Image (spheres, rainbow, N blue to C red):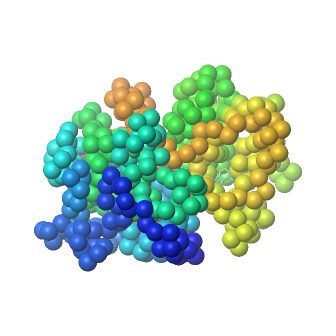
Amino acid sequence: MATNYAGKMAEKAMGHGAHNRAATTDISNPARDGGKYADPSGERMKALVWMGKNDVRVVETPKPKIIDAHDVIVKVTGSTVCGSDVHLLHGVIVQTEVGDILGHEFCGVVESVGPSVTGLKPGDRVVNSFCISCGECRYCKMKLTTACERTNASTVQAKMYGSQLSGIFGYSHFVGGYAGGQAEFVRAPLAENNLLKLPASVPDEKGLYLSDVLPTSYHAVTYTGVKEGDTVAIWGLGPIGFMSCYWAKKRGAKRVIGIDGNWRCDYAMAKIPGVETVNFSKLTANETVPDKIREMVPGGVDVCIDATGGEYGKGFVHKTELASGMEQDTSEMLNEAIYATRNFGRVGIIGDYVGFTNHFNIGAVMELGITIVGCGQAPVHKYWKELLEMLEKGEVDPTIMLTHRFRLEDIDKAYRLQEKREQGLVKCFVETRFSAKRCPGTPELTIL
Ligand SMILES: NC(=O)c1ccc[n+]([C@@H]2O[C@H](COP(=O)([O-])OP(=O)(O)OC[C@H]3O[C@@H](n4cnc5c(N)ncnc54)[C@H](O)[C@@H]3O)[C@@H](O)[C@H]2O)c1
Ligand SMILES: [Zn+2]
Ligand SMILES: [Zn+2]
């Protein structure tokens, strides 16, 4: 909350960079500005909103309307909760405001289109890209769309990082303040660019994951250059780390070692043949994760990928520093990764880090020639067509990580489960009243 307040004040002082935007930003709920962004029909919808640290709720709010000529209104048929949403729940993302509708992963049916939209029409089934990009700036031309220069008006970010990210659906005003898809309807700006049509052969329970998990995990292994014969260690076996293990194996990595502290280790071994794991909660007081990895792969691994997140302090020192605000992100997983990597190996950071860290082992990075690569919010557009083709051909099946199906009405409770990683939850599919019948072979509905 302190960071949110500071972010808001800083933005006020530095000014909002809303000029030269390709889309209208900061409409994080149609109810903002006296309902100016609400559908004139007066129709209302269910949506999950952020009400403060550790407080998200399902509320009734106005259905959105088309604002810009390239907008589309999507009737949501599937959404989910992401590990990234847990950071929002914990209030660690700056510039989250009360009433913001969350959710950056959704699929649905086009309900209405703005006057300049081409290539999409009412009735089309679509999935979103979590990042909102213009399709025209220099980064979009390179398909590095999370670096789009024209969809995020936050000036705080440029101040913190020197540059800034694209807009992101449902992820605070730090990334554009767009309303998210954990709702019955959502406004998709620059829709031709940020929605991908789903063919009938790809059900929602698979297509939905083109919005984030599939491209993000694919980005992690592609950008770190995982190739046949490599040895790879991956921290965190949530959906991102789990699917990164999957891609690493598919690439022909010789050894893939997943690291986590709970039952997700067993889940990964059961679902991805050949994956080995280190469950750090089972290590003795004298054992460390990197020692264990170096025991398994003498000399260290070629590639390490951190798919955890900077808020997950592990030891006393970092927990204290995080709690007291002395640091914003822990360096523990990164230091473990650096320690487990062979000389001149690669370390990728795909888990979310937002600020500064203490006690980072910069010496090892420099002296041993380790390359930090494979970072960034994943540029979905670079990969999603290739991944859709794989889905169509049945070459990848994201339902191996799908453990639960919930209702939108219960999504606040699903946040709690995601946070605690309880009840065997890896990834959920969240249905709405508009969803198609459950795809055979996917989890039955659980009412929370
Ligand atoms: N870069 C991107 O584009 C992008 C996209 C989506 C998600 N993310 C981020 O990736 C991370 C993973 O996402 P997810 O959905 O899989 O989240 P998740 O919260 O389900 O998974 C994180 C896993 O890390 C484990 N973990 C925590 N501390 C650990 C430690 N010290 N060592 C090993 N494992 C540890 C947890 O037990 C958990 O299983 C999150 O930080 C999320 O915000 C990044
Ligand atoms: Zn996500
Ligand atoms: Zn752009």
The quadrant holding residue 421 is bottom right
Residue 264 visible to the viewer: no
Q: Quadrant of the image for the N terminus?
A: bottom right
Residue positioned 67% across, 59% down in the render: 356
Q: Position of residue 269 (x, y in %)?
A: 60, 38
Residue positioned 72% across, 69% down in the render: 326
Q: Is residue 301 positioned above or below 361 on the image? A: above
Q: Residue lying at the far right in this picture: please name it.
A: 286
The quadrant holding residue 432 is bottom left
Q: Is residue 296 positioned above or below 157 on the image? A: above
Q: Is residue 175 positioned above or below 123 on the image? A: below
Q: Position of residue 38 (x, y in %)?
A: 21, 68
Q: Position of residue 250 (x, y in %)?
A: 54, 27
Residue positioned 49% across, 43% down in the render: 378
- Nearer to the camera, 376 or 294: 376
Q: Position of residue 412 (x, y in %)?
A: 42, 67
Instruction: Describe residue 156's horizontal placement relative to residue 193 as left or right.
Output: right
Residue 218 visible to the viewer: yes
Instruction: Describe residue 76's horizontal placement relative to residue 101 as left or right.
Output: left
Residue positioned 45% across, 58% down in the render: 175
Q: Quadrant of the image for the C terminus?
A: bottom left
